[in-house]
Amino acid sequence: MRIKGRLLVPIALALMLTTAGCGTLSAPASGHADAPLSGQTAPSSEPSPDDTPTPEIPTDEQIPTRAAGTFTRATGTGRVIGAGKERVRYSVSVEKGIAWGDIPAWKPARFAASIEQVLAAPNGWATSAQHPVTNKAVNLSRASWSFQRVGTSKADVDVRLATPETVDRLCGASGVDTEGVYSCKYGKTIMINLRRWLQGSPGYPVTIDEYHAGVINHEFGHFLGFAHMKCGGLGEPGPVMMTQTIDLGGCLPNVSPFVGNGRFVSGPWAPS
């Protein structure tokens, strides 16, 4: 991500509560995992009855770069996810007028279901109810969160799936250059770049579903007050707040804020 034309491999700590944060976690274009994530075992070479085909990854030419620039919100109210002290009410929107062509459409209901799956997954932000987060650098003391989707504009944060040009325009208005590729968070809005959502990025060894988890967890992390972090130690799982596709820094790929023992994965703040 670039801010005002300057490469921002991390975001300044001073920006974390007042300006935009970017999410650069992404999956390889093939959609295959080249290596297991921390805390996971490598998949068996033998197919199981539950195996599903790897989704076909669309090409750049198939992915629309622009659409209407306005949004349709998912209707209804979702279930409460987690038992954390602070309730985060989020809404979910998809840009209108996306010409999906042969690509299976991501309608608001489908996008909402994917986000709910990420937030409800083991080791997601809702794990904070059992393992509260204390971090003096961001004024957190035994913080924990729960989540609920709402179908109105009276949400704490709106998560939007949009074409690259729309993401660039809206994030750029807040001073964040998403370069036609990245996602961002500004104010009470999270912008998810459609190209990355559908394709991922070559070289980062996670599946496309794991990419979805990574980018949603990363951007929600910015909303919760976290800036970018660096690797906490060689061979350790990377903090979800790392810009892992830019540089893993010796860490292992990791798309969740917690690991299996309930440890919050942290690292040094990345300097500006």
Image (cartoon, rainbow, N blue to C red):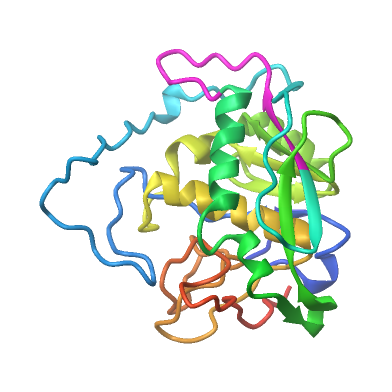
Q: Nearer the viewer, residue 217 or 242?
A: 217
Give the quadrant of residue 258.
bottom right
Instruction: Work out which quarter of the rendered image holds the N terminus and state it.
Output: bottom right
Q: Is residue 237 above or below residue 146?
A: below
Q: Nearer the viewer, residue 169 or 106?
A: 106
Quick check: can you spot residue 159?
yes
Give the quadrant of residue 56.
top left
Q: Nearer the viewer, residue 265 or 35?
A: 265
Give the quadrant of residue 253.
bottom left
Q: Nearer the viewer, residue 49 or 15?
A: 49
Question: Which residue sits at x=68%, y=17%?
Answer: 96
Q: Is residue 126 left or right of residue 157?
A: left
Question: Which residue sits at x=52%, y=54%?
Answer: 121
Q: Is residue 98 magenta?
A: yes
Task: Provide residue 192's location: percent of width, then percent of height.
Answer: 63, 40
Task: Provide residue 33's location: percent of width, then percent of height.
Answer: 30, 54
Q: Is residue 178 magenta?
A: no
Q: Which residues are magenta?
A: 90-106
Task: Provide residue 147's location: percent of width, then percent of height.
Answer: 72, 50
Instruction: Work out which quarter of the rendered image holds the C terminus and state it.
Output: bottom right
- Please name the predominant secondary structure of the magenta segment in the image: loop
Q: Is residue 142 above or below residue 3?
A: below
Question: Which residue sits at x=14%, y=46%?
Answer: 47
Q: Is residue 238 left or right of residue 272?
A: left
Q: Is residue 174 left or right of residue 197?
A: right
Task: Provide residue 97's location: percent of width, then percent of height.
Answer: 65, 13
Q: How many marks overall? A: 0
Question: Which residue sits at x=69%, y=25%?
Answer: 74
